[in-house]
Each structure stands twice: as C-alpha cells, then as structure tokens.
Image (cartoon, rainbow, N blue to C red):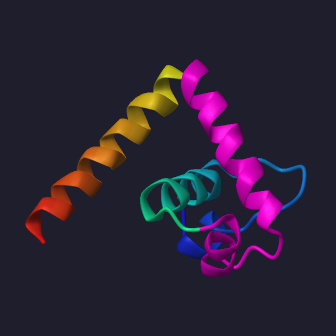
Amino acid sequence: VKREESLVLKRGEENLPSDVAVYLVRLYNRETLLSVGRYLDISNYSTVGSVVERIKKRRMKDLSLRNHLEKIEKKIFKSQKQI
C-alpha cells in the first residue's frame, strides 16, 4: 500500500492502514486529537477520536489485528531503545 493511499480517510469506508496509523500516532505521541489530526491532515479532530476507539474495540476482538499491532509496537520500542 502506498503511503498516500494508506492515509486517506473517507467517511463510511474502512481503511485499516490509515486507522492503524492514526491509532499509533495518538497512542505513542500523546498529542491532542486536534494535533494528531493536523499532523495526519485530518480536518476534524473527532474523526481521530472515532478511529482510535474503533481500533481499540477491533483490537480486542480481532486476534490477527492484535498480533499485527504487537509486531509494530515491538519495532517502535526497539527503535526507541537505539536512540
């Protein structure tokens, strides 16, 4: 998936790569919803909140997504240790 395609949010359409990006940026940067939205070019801060909640709920139910997120998080932690 190209970066440009992965970060496009459209109302009513699921875009898992984009949702995961929003979730991780919010989770690990601890910025406000508005700041995350600006960083990811999302015009409405409530969209950020909705995406984060959607991924939280889906993570609880979807083992595949949970495993995928855990792999990403391990890479994040590993790269932070190197800094």
The residue located at (62%, 67%) in the rendering is 32
Which quarter of the figure has residue 36?
bottom right
Is 49 within the magenta? yes
The residue located at (69%, 41%) in the rendering is 53
Q: Position of residue 76 (x, y in %)?
A: 28, 56
Q: Nearer the viewer, residue 33 or 21?
A: 33
The residue located at (70%, 79%) in the rendering is 41
Q: Nearer the viewer, residue 69 or 39?
A: 39
Q: Nearer the viewer, residue 14 or 27?
A: 27
**Residue 32 against residue 39 in the figure, above or below:** above
Q: Is residue 77 left or right of residue 44?
A: left
Q: Position of residue 29 (x, y in %)?
A: 45, 65
**Residue 29 against residue 23 in the figure, above or below:** below
**Residue 2 against residue 14 in the figure, above or below:** below
Residue most extreme to the left? 82
Q: Is residue 19 left or right of residue 47?
A: left
- Which residues, given as a range, are shown in magenta? 32-61
Q: Position of residue 2 (x, y in %)?
A: 54, 70
The residue located at (77%, 49%) in the rendering is 50
Is 37 within the magenta? yes
Which quarter of the figure has residue 58?
top right
Count of number-bearing discs: 0
The quarter of the picture where the N terminus appears is: bottom right
Q: Is residue 18 left or right of residue 75?
A: right
Q: Nearer the viewer, residue 5 or 12?
A: 12
Residue most extreme to the right? 12
Magenta part mainly helix, strand or loop?
Answer: helix
Q: Position of residue 39 (x, y in %)?
A: 60, 79
